[in-house]
Amino acid sequence: MSDLNGKIALVTGASRGIGKAIALALADAGADVAFTFLSSKESAEALAEEIRSKGRKANAYQSNASDFSQANELVQKIIQEFGKLDILVNNAGITKDGLLLRMSEQDWDAVIGTNLKSVFNFTKAVYRPMMSQQSGKIINITSIVGITGNAGQANYAASKAGILGFTKSVAKELASRNIQVNAVAPGFVDTDMTAKLTDSQKEAILKVIPMRRTAKPEEIAAVVRFLASSEANYVTGQVLCVDGGMVM
């Protein structure tokens, strides 16, 4: 698929895992890619070089996604350097799991700030530029946990559920401006986050997945690539679950 030739994409939190797979998938489809990272400069530069090896332009930007001013300044900088911005993928996310009984206010605020406020920050920053060009794709990475809930993840589930309501609301605001806003809700994916689970935890998870396996990051990225393409021009306000059948 080379439907994204000439398009400029921004992916937040893309130095590893799902974000990295998304950045590479968009580049494979023809897009030039800007992406953010928080701490691993080495991983970010390696990803940028991998994208450039595909013949696409790529820049990595160190940024705290939960900081409103940083997000706004970064979007302006990317538009100056790339000329425009066609696709925003809000992927930045963290977990700080624990039962609510033991969850600190700091753990709550950190997860809500990174996972939910960042979506507001970057969407707000691209709102006017996309309205001015009368086109755009905004794709928010949520989670099936935002639909089902999960014990020990009240903060994470709340942040991901908030993304669902945000997506549908902004989709209604921007639909008449030819800007599509959708969400992708992954189930359990082979990433650094799930690698921390014990064997017994992984076994319990597989039992509730009808397909009896976890997803590869590339399988999430393929759905994002579809939503970013012209093939999804009549799709907005939707939540696509990529979960092996967990939510039916």
Image: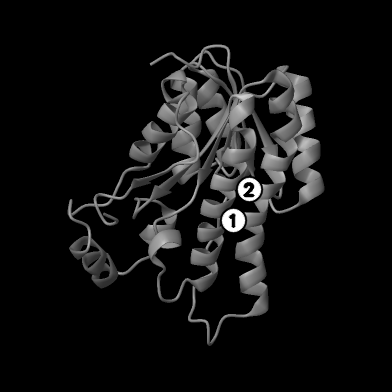
Image position, residue 17 (x, y; %): 45, 45
Q: Quadrant of residue 96?
A: bottom right
Q: Name the residue carrying label 1.
A: 115
* Mark sitting on residue 67: none
Q: Amino acid at mark 2?
A: Val
Image position, residue 138 (x, y; %): 57, 35
Name the residue at 55% across, 25% down.
Answer: 49
Mark 1: which secondary structure? Answer: helix
Q: Amino acid at mark 1?
A: Asn
Vertical position of residue 184 compared to residue 156: above or below: above
Image position, residue 70 (x, y; %): 78, 45
Quarter the N terminus occupies: top left
Q: Quadrant of residue 193?
A: bottom left
Say whether marks 1 and 2 touch (CB < 8 Å). yes
Vertical position of residue 110 compared to residue 138: above or below: below
Q: Name the residue carrying label 2.
A: 119
Can residue 201 be seen by looking at this rendering? yes
Within 10 Å of disc 1 (Cα), the crowding (few <14, some 14-19, many 20+) is many
Image position, residue 209 (x, y; %): 22, 58
